[in-house]
Image (cartoon, rainbow, N blue to C red):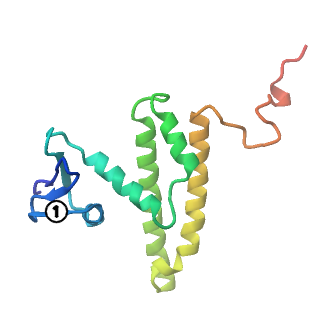
Amino acid sequence: MSAARVIKKYPNRRLYDTEDSRYITLVDVKDLVLNKIDFLVIDKKSGDDITRSILLQVISEQEQQGDAIMSQDFLSQVIRSYGNVMPGFIGNYLEQSLKLFITQQQNLRSQVKRVVGIDPVVAVTDIAQKNFNRWKSLQDEVLRRFAGGGRNRDEGSKGSVPEDHKKVG
């Protein structure tokens, strides 16, 4: 396996791809990700690895264009979760949830192609949107509970103790 491609970030905020010997944009970084090319972004001045920061910038640009994946409530809950839960738990949970979601989508696409014999991307758009909405709803509920705002599914109870659990006497 080859070493990761090195991208240098200069003080003027420009990114330089050392393999292609050219300046690149965040769109180019997005293309590297989509093409599953391993890379590392190094701050030229400090020598620090700033790959995560650059990936967050790519996500930020994506969120500003078209349909956003992350709601304002979701982003707020993520911010609130810093320092309030076991380190790494939320990140690991979200990462595993997304991997599961992607695997389910791939399985569904292959099943549709086998059964229907047409382009699965076209055939599953409606199903994928419904699955995504269910997944998003679940994630929002988990984050609400972590933030201490969880409620029972039965909206009528509003956190009250069920009758069969109340002390008698």
Residue 19 pos. (x, y %): 9, 61
Q: Work out whether residue 21 or residue 148 is closer to the camera in this orientation and state it.
A: 21
Q: Which residue is located at x 62 percent, y 44 percent? A: 141
- Residue placed under numbered mark 1 in the picture: 23
Residue 80 pos. (x, y %): 52, 35
Horizontally, residue 98 falls left or right of residue 15, namely right
Q: Work out whether residue 13 or residue 153 is closer to the camera in this orientation and state it.
A: 13
Horizontally, residue 169 falls left or right of residue 6, namely right
Dot 1 falls on a residue whose secondary structure is strand
Q: Amino acid at mark 1?
A: Tyr
Asked if 121 appears above or below 57 in the picture, the reply is below
Q: Does residue 139 appear in the picture of this structure?
A: no
Asked if 131 appears above or below 79 in the picture, the reply is below
Q: Does residue 145 appear in the picture of this structure?
A: yes
Q: Which residue is located at x 53 percent, y 74 percent? A: 125
Name the residue at the front extreme.
12
Place residue 50 in its image quadrant: top left
Q: Which residue is located at x 29 percent, y 51 percent? A: 54
Residue 123 pos. (x, y %): 52, 80
Place residue 35 in its image quadrant: bottom left
Quarter of the image with the N terminus in it = bottom left
Q: Determine crowd level at label 1: few under 14, some 14-19, many 20+ residues with C-alpha closer than 10 A.
A: some
Quarter of the image with the C terminus in it = top right
